[in-house]
Image: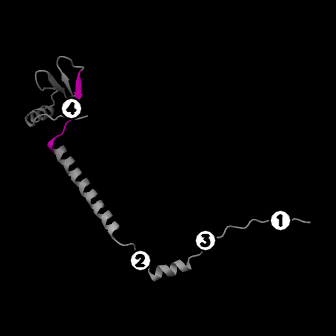
Amino acid sequence: MNWIPFSAALNEDIEAAKQAKEKKFKVDDERFIDFRAMLQRRYDDPKRRRDVKRKTAKMRAAEEKAAAKKAAKAAQEQEQQEQEEDSPPPQRTSRSRAAAAKAKPAAKPAKRATRKKKR
């Protein structure tokens, strides 16, 4: 759902009414906000309604901070991935060759016992 924000002045008035613990706030001649249900309703038809999304300055600042942190993390991961792609594959050392030589070969599958037919 697309949210259409109220004007800054109206936002301040709405927030002041919310802080004053009012039950309703008159938006204009046709609409009001029901703070109990956090809905915008119409005077002529209260069944017509839409959700009200509350964002204080503190909430917006926290969202922006979280978004910036997420973007920084994504940039860091991208940079790390690019470095891994650009770096050559690791070289085997003599130690790893020796370890590979000492490694036991894979176990051979067990032979099935067969019976010799008597003639």
Q: What's the mark number on residue 106? A: 3
Instruction: Look at label 1 and name its amino acid.
Output: Arg
Q: Mark 1 to mark 2: distance in Å?
A: 51 Å
- Frontmost of labels 1 and 4 is 1
Relative depth, front residue between 1 and 52:
1
Q: Is 111 in front, or is 88?
A: 88
Residue wearing tag 4:
52
User: Of callouts 3 and 4, which one flags the residue occurring earlier in the amino acid sequence?
Assistant: 4
The residue lying at 23 percent from left, 35 percent from top is 2
Examine the residues drawn in magenta and state their main secondary structure: loop
Q: Quadrant of the N terminus?
A: top left
Q: Amino acid at mark 4?
A: Val
Q: Position of residue 55 (x, y in %)?
A: 18, 39
Q: Residues within 10 Å of mark 4 (few under 14, many from 20)?
A: some
Q: Earlier in the sequence, mark 1 or mark 3?
A: 3
83 left or right of 63 in image: right
Q: CA distance from mark 2 to mark 3?
A: 24 Å
Q: Amino acid at mark 3?
A: Ala
Which secondary structure, mark 4? loop
Q: CA distance from mark 4 to mark 2?
A: 60 Å
Tell me where residue 83 appears, x and y as whole percent.
31, 67
Mark closest to the chain's N terminus, 4 or 2: 4
Q: Secondary structure at mark 3?
A: loop
The image quarter in which residue 36 lies:
top left
What residue sits 20% from the left and 23% below the top? 41
Check disc 1: other Cα within 10 Å, few if <14, some if 14-19, many if 20+: few
Q: Amino acid at mark 2?
A: Gln
Segment tinted magenta in the rendering: 48-57
Q: Which residue is mark 2?
A: 91
Q: Quadrant of the C terminus?
A: bottom right
